[in-house]
Image: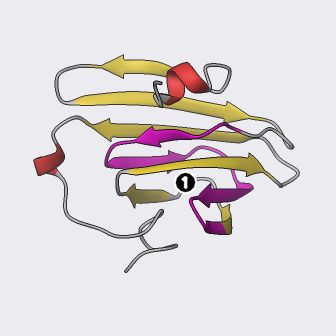
Amino acid sequence: MSLDPTVTNSDHYRVILENEKVRVLEYTDAPGDETTPHEHPDSVMYTLSSFKRRLMSGDLEMEVELDAGTVLWLPAQQHHAKNIGETATHVIFVELKDPDAAPAAAGLVEGVLGPQ
């Protein structure tokens, strides 16, 4: 079973650029929308809108509220999430294709769940 977010959650994720080094995804949702489990390689996330969501990964569950213009490093992970805020989510993910090109990190969201 594929855990590619463009397959598992094609109503929310779309590829806007892909080459041999990166895949760039655009993610959008509305308040109350929830994704099914999917995975991302090491990535950079850029928030185009402010939003609040619940992230779930295994036994870990947390609420995250981010402002528009936030840029975060995301280590490779599998998760699903729900928009629990009152605004739509609009995010760009730059997924790295070379796992050796990224620094090691822990947690779901560097600086939110992992070390800073």
| Point 36% across, 38% down: residue | 94
Residue 116 in view: no
Judge from the rendering whether residue 25 lies leftward or rightward of residue 65; answer left or right: left
Name the residue: 45% across, 56% down.
Answer: 71
Residue 86, given in percent of the width and then of the height, sits at 88, 51
Q: Is residue 19 left or right of residue 80?
A: left
Residue 96: image location, x then y, percent: 26, 39
Residue lying farthest to the front in this orientation = 1
Q: Is residue 76 above or below residue 26?
A: below
55 within the magenta span: yes
Q: For mark 1, does the 10 Å Cα neighbourhood hold few (<14), some (14 to 19), or many (20 or more) residues?
A: few
Looking at the picture, which amino acid does disc 1 mark?
Gly
Examine the image and state in which quarter residue 58 appears. bottom right
Horizontal placement of 63 versus 4: left or right?
right
Element marked by disc 1: loop
User: Is 52 within the magenta?
Assistant: yes
Quadrant in the rendering for residue 69: bottom right
Residue 97 seen in the current view:
yes
Which residue is tagged 1?
A: 69
Q: Based on the displayed image, in which of its 4 quarters is residue 60 positioned?
A: bottom right
Residue at the spot x=41%, y=41% of the render? 40
Magenta: main secondary structure:
strand
**Along the line of sight, which residue is nearer the eye, 26 or 40?**
40
Compare residues 111 and 67 and report the one nearer the observer: 111
The segment highlighted magenta reads 35-61
Q: Position of residue 18 (x, y in %)?
A: 30, 19
- Residue 52 versus residue 29 in the image, above or below: below
> Which corner quadrant holds the C terminus?
bottom left
